[in-house]
Image (cartoon, rainbow, N blue to C red):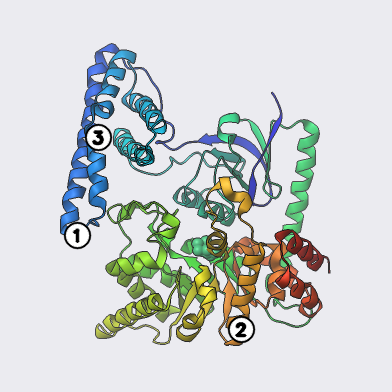
Amino acid sequence: MVSFALTGVGVSGGIAIGRAQLVSHATLEVAHYSIAPAKVDAEINRFAHAVGEVQRELEALHAATSGGEVPSELGPFLRVHAMILGDPAFAEAPKKTIAEQRCNAEWALTLQLGVLTDQFDQMDDAYLRERKQDVVQVGERVLKRLLGKPGPLPAPVAEEHTVLVAHDLSPADVIQFKRRHYGAFLTDIGGATSHTAIVARSLNVPAVVATHNARQLIRDSELVIVDGDAGVVIINPDRAVLAEYRLRQTELGLERQKLKRLRSKKAETLDGITVELHANIELPEDLTAAVDNGAAGIGLFRSEFLFLNREGLPSEDEQFEAYRAVAAGMQGKPVTIRTFDLGADKQAEGLAGLARVAANPALGLRAVRFCLAEPRLFQTQLRALLRASHHGKVRILVPMLASSAEIDQTLAAIAAAKESLREQRIPFDEAVEVGGMIEIPAAVIAMDPFLAKLDFLSIGTNDLIQYTLAVDRADEAVAHLYDPLHPAVVRLLAQAIATATKAGKPIAVCGEMAGEIALTRLLLGLGLRHFSMHPTQLLAIKQRVLTSEVAAMKSTVDRIRRAPSADRINLLVEQLNAL
Ligand code: PEP
Ligand code: MG
């Protein structure tokens, strides 16, 4: 067995040693099997039937555009999709392949999709070239029909010593692994702060993304070492390497064990500054990890994860129950629940009818923009949140706000939800606090309405970096440009923290930077006093806080604020960390 190594971006630390288990999306990789001559006609009919069903589905969606149930802008796309589906190159050619090659319908369709997409790639006209995406989408719809289920990744067998290897995992895929236990995750693509990476991190297992071709190079059951800190994967290690990693694994385990002693210790710097350390969660069941790691509150509950992996939308009562459970579970400590941040890389099955075809999803109808455009959905969530505020210290956090008008519209929606509850005499906390996420540079540059109208702020550095540097956080091709220590990012952070602090508004960081030990001192030095992170990071960050002296960092932090380059800032941050 050949031993070899792959490198990628380590997105969740630690070391795992286990056997590879390759997983694939139905639409990314379909099975190829032979069809007995007597069954060829039936296979052709199966294909024709699936095409017919998708045709009817598209017609129904198109009809719904006139009734307003489906946005009318989708009309032209649906027409294009129906045309593609009706084209003989799409609908007839696979039948011929099934007959000639006696293969299954999925395989025949995949082959034809390959032929068609190659043809599109060679077109001179940019507009036509882009239609390739439509062909792929229509192909995927038919494939899903053929496979009989539109669901997510099939769940592999869970085992502590299993290293999951996939081309890509969506946040919805990863969230379903929360209830199982794996040793590690590897994916070919993905960026360091993609939601997939964030969820993988919250599972507290090593994960490496952007390995480019792990899925192709690694075989099922091969022995794999995953070093999530270094972003290195070693396949079929020899004995000496294996022994070394086992030793490091034991050492890391011991370190974790030691940190547990800090669980109920107050987070305070050497010079007596108190720091609030809160937890980020995705599902109510993450509460246990937050409590076990001594969280002083929930700083970010990404409520949109309630939408993923399910049919239909969660009802008001269902949402209320999820929020109430977290609010009650934290026993009076603050529980910051973010209103849905759907769109971009988090698409919900239940929203298929509402989802739009966006050219740039991260700049599109995402987060609060989506909620404001779907008032019924928003009201349902706001009522559920307000009802939960009667059972604990719930705070409402609104993502992706950019302007004064959006803040006004959001506050009006909250006022309307409150009014409807009052009319029905349903109790809620009248003084529930409403905060805004600072994740668009515009919000830092023109912070006045945020300070005037909101009760608290929370910086989403994951998006703030993406939007400041114009680097898609989920795209591994530009992952090397995604830099938390770019001077523009550091200055925006410094400005946001200073402006809010001067105005007496509590401001937190709830992006991934808050859980990075190497950045804790920088953030403390910039004046940050509220951090929210994965529960598994809480104790390590607390240890860092306990060994930091803010006053001693002042001159270095002042130099960082003025530093002209990321290289320079990196050096200065190293100096801070060596103090
Ligand atoms: C962020 O953008 O930093 C953030 C915390 O929100 P999310 O990662 O869910 O976009
Ligand atoms: Mg965000």
Residue drawn at x 69%, y 81% is 274
Can residue 325 be seen by looking at this rendering? yes
Q: What element carries label 1?
A: loop
3D distance between C-alphas at marks 3 and 2: 57 Å
Specify the amino acid type for callout 1. Answer: Gly
Name the residue beneath numbered marker 1: 68
* Left or right position of 314 against 79: right
The span from disc 1 to disc 2 (Cα, nearest Å) is 45 Å
Residue 191 image offset from top left, x and y in percent = 56, 50
| Pointer 3 or 1: first along the chain | 1
Query: Of label 3 and label 2, which has the lower sequence position?
Result: 3
Residue 438 appears in the rendering: no
Q: Residues within 10 Å of mark 2 (few under 14, many from 20)?
A: some
Task: Pinpoint residue 261: horizontal percent, then vertical percent.
Answer: 73, 68
Location of residue 272 in the rendering, given as x and y in whole percent from the top left corner? 75, 83
For label 3, the residue is 85
Q: How far apart are marks 3 and 1 (CA)?
A: 24 Å
In the image, which disc is placed on residue 501? 2
Quarter holding the C terminus? bottom right
First along the sequence among labels 1 and 2: 1
Q: In percent of the image, x 21 and y 24: which residue is there?
A: 45
Mark 1 Cα-neighbour bin, 10 Å: few <14, some 14–19, many ≥20:
few
Q: Which amino acid does label 2 sit on?
A: Thr
Horizontal arrangement in the rendering, residue 236 relative to residue 469 (left or right) = right
Q: Mark 3: which amino acid?
A: Leu
Q: Nearer the viewer, residue 75 or 515?
A: 75
Question: Based on the displayed image, in which of its 4 quarters is residue 324 positioned?
Answer: bottom left
Q: Which quarter of the figure has residue 422?
A: bottom left
Q: Nearer the viewer, residue 578 or 452?
A: 452
Ligand 1 closer than 8 Å to label 1 CB: no
Is 557 placed left or right of 350 in the picture?
Answer: right
